[in-house]
């Protein structure tokens, strides 16, 4: 695999500083530092761009909650506990999010007919439309973030990241 260096970015300066500082430290791996810092910077750029999509009436947290409801592994409904786990937030935080979405008419909450202690959350048509509107805006942000790569380079990047993920999942 050919190694192509186009030009230096801001992370190269960071890695150079650390390489100078740790020049006699074999535990420091400049390539690892560079890759991880670049991934963090890319994700931070995407997070900032995603925030610009939302307004005060519909927050990124509202979107993420609708998203886990729309793409979760259950049919088209979930319990608040399932959503909290999928969104990686506390149950209390999820209750607050669901209150906002319910008040906005984006979800419904109903008692389970079999187990009345269980609440079932479903998206409304308005909720589905709001999610759909924002997911495509988010896709545009993601594509802009990785727009410097060709289709073949994106496949190569995915192959490399998959290799890392498989090693971490062992």
Image (cartoon, rainbow, N blue to C red):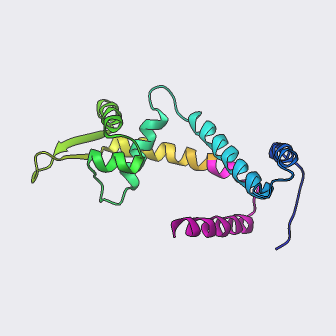
Q: Is residue 76 left or right of residue 143?
A: left
The count of marks equals 0
Q: Nearer the viewer, residue 20 or 65?
A: 20
- Residue lying at the far top of the rendered structure: 56
In the rendered view, tell whether residue 146 sits above or below residue 108: below
Q: Residue 45 in the image: x percent, y percent?
A: 67, 41
Q: Is residue 139 left or right of residue 70?
A: right
Q: Residue 31 in the image: x percent, y percent?
A: 78, 58
In the rendered view, tell whether residue 102 sits above or below residue 85: above
Q: Quadrant of residue 27?
A: bottom right
- Residue lying at the far bottom of the rendered structure: 1
- Residue 146 part of the magenta-drawn span: yes
Q: Residue 109 in the image: x percent, y percent?
A: 22, 41
Q: Residue at image x 80%, y 55%?
A: 30
- Residue 17 part of the magenta-drawn span: no
Q: Residue at image x 45%, y 43%?
A: 64
Q: Which residues are magenta?
A: 142-170
Image quarter where the N terminus lies is bottom right
Q: Nearer the viewer, residue 103 or 130?
A: 103
Q: Residue 11 in the image: x percent, y percent?
A: 80, 45
**Is residue 52 among what the camera can see?**
yes
Please, what is the dominant secondary structure of the magenta stretch? helix
**Is residue 122 among what the camera can see?**
no
Q: Residue at image x 73%, y 49%?
A: 38
Q: Nearer the viewer, residue 11 or 23?
A: 23
């Amino acid at each position: 695999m050919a190694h192509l260096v186009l030009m230096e970015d801001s992370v190269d300066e960071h890695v150079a500083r650390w390489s100078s500082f740790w020049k006699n430290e074999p535990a420091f791996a400049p390539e690892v530092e560079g890759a991880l810092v670049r991934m963090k910077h890319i994700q931070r750029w995407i997070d900032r761009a995603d925030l610009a999509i939302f307004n005060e009436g519909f927050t990124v947290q509202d979107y993420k909650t609708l998203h886990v409801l729309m793409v979760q592994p259950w049919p088209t409904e979930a319990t608040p506990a399932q959503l909290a786990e999928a969104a990686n937030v506390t149950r209390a935080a999820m209750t607050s999010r669901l209150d906002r979405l319910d008040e906005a008419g984006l979800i419904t909450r109903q008692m389970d007919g079999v187990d009345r202690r269980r609440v079932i959350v479903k998206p409304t048509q308005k909720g589905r439309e709001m999610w759909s509107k924002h997911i495509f805006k988010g896709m545009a942000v993601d594509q802009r973030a990785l727009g410097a790569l060709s289709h073949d380079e994106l496949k190569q990047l995915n192959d490399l990241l998959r290799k890392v993920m498989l090693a971490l999942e062992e």
